[in-house]
Image: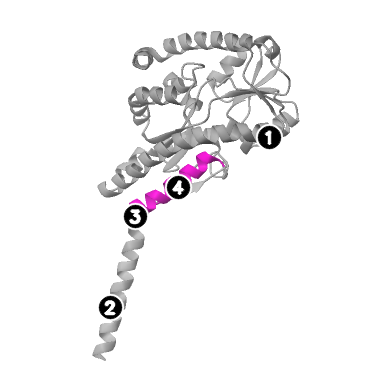
Amino acid sequence: MKQLAIKKTLLACLATAAGGAAAAQTQWDMPTGYAVGSFQTENVQQFAGDVERATAGKLKITLHPNGSLYKANEIKRAVQTGQTQAGEFILSGAANENALFGVDSIPFLADSYGAAKRLAEVSRPHIDKLLAAQGIKLLFTSPWPGQSLYSIKPVESVADLKGTKMRAYNPATSRIAQFAGAQPTTIQLSELGQALATGTVENFLTSSASGVENKLYESVKYLYTVNAWLPKNAIVVNKAAFDALDKPTQDGLLKAAAAAEQRGWQLSEQKDAQYIKELTAEGMKVTPPSDTLRAELRLIGGRMTTEWMKNAGADGQAIIDAYRK
């Protein structure tokens, strides 16, 4: 009887310990608007796995890709209000809230990976402060390849864009369409193929990655590598959710985030070269822009830089000054 009592006591202790371990695990949801096969999604998925390992299972992040939990344009707000603990969104998509969010989508300000990285570094403290005021903590950023011009018809100059329907996904792309005399049309990336098939969109700026992942070569035959800017995705967490973690778990999360940021920048550059080759192999005509088109787009970019600095105020001026040093 005594042995049976001891055995029951041990089993009860084990059950209590197991229940305590289960209760100690924190579970977060992380929505993203990008497809499972996107290199951005793959990087975030690896980040989630790294977090679980780095925290010895104390923090588990479940990724919800392809807008399955929240649509791409709803994710930032969902994190801000605590509806989800973490999420991924494109920073420039929030430029209508504050111009600082659009710093990486100013045309031709930073048109290479090295320049984009420098711009990201000098603007990071300002973005951190802005997000913190909204109850959001920025974990890391990851860039898309440079934005290039896709078109169903040849484009030799800006005049060829006049009157066409140009896809817009943030205030900057809407402004470019306006400068070019095109009609800006807001279409989510996941809906772009259908929009092209129905004639809702005729041209747009997006990355080589989006071209491959969304099989845009099935509807678009011309790609001009204008490399206008390198927009970044932001992987963020609700600040209250982050603050609720113990210090070792916070440290593990931030370590995984730092590794994911470095990996994301490297992956993006490697994938860009790969995607350009794939698009060419699929029959797209991939060429640099004509001298006329490049000059005209740079003129638009100069105007938009001036506009952005006026809208962004002292912080914007500080970022551009630091970047140009």
Do the CB atoms of the residues marked 3 and 1 lie less than 8 Å apart? Answer: no
Which span of residues is magenta-colored? Answer: 38-62
Question: How many angstroms separate mark 2 from mark 4 (CA)?
Answer: 38 Å
List x then y, in percent, for residue 107: 52, 17
Q: Closer to the camera, 101 or 98? A: 101
Residue 59 visible in the snapshot = no
Alpha carbon separation for disc pair 4 and 3: 17 Å
Name the residue that disc number 3 marks.
58
So how many labels did they put on this image? 4
**Quadrant housing the C terminus:** top left
At label 2, counting other C-alpha atoms closer than 10 Å, the crowd grade (few under 14, some 14-19, many 20 or more) is few
Instruction: Give the foreground label among 2 and 3.
Output: 3
Q: Could you give the CA–CA distance between mark 2 and mark 1, rounded to whole angstroms?
A: 65 Å
Residue 305 vs 240, above or below: the answer is above
Mark 2 → mark 3, Cα distance in angstroms? 25 Å
Q: Name the residue under label 1.
A: 281
Q: How far apart are marks 3 and 1 (CA)?
A: 46 Å
Residue 83 at x, y percent in the picture: 45, 42
Q: Indicate whether 191 appears above or below 117.
A: below
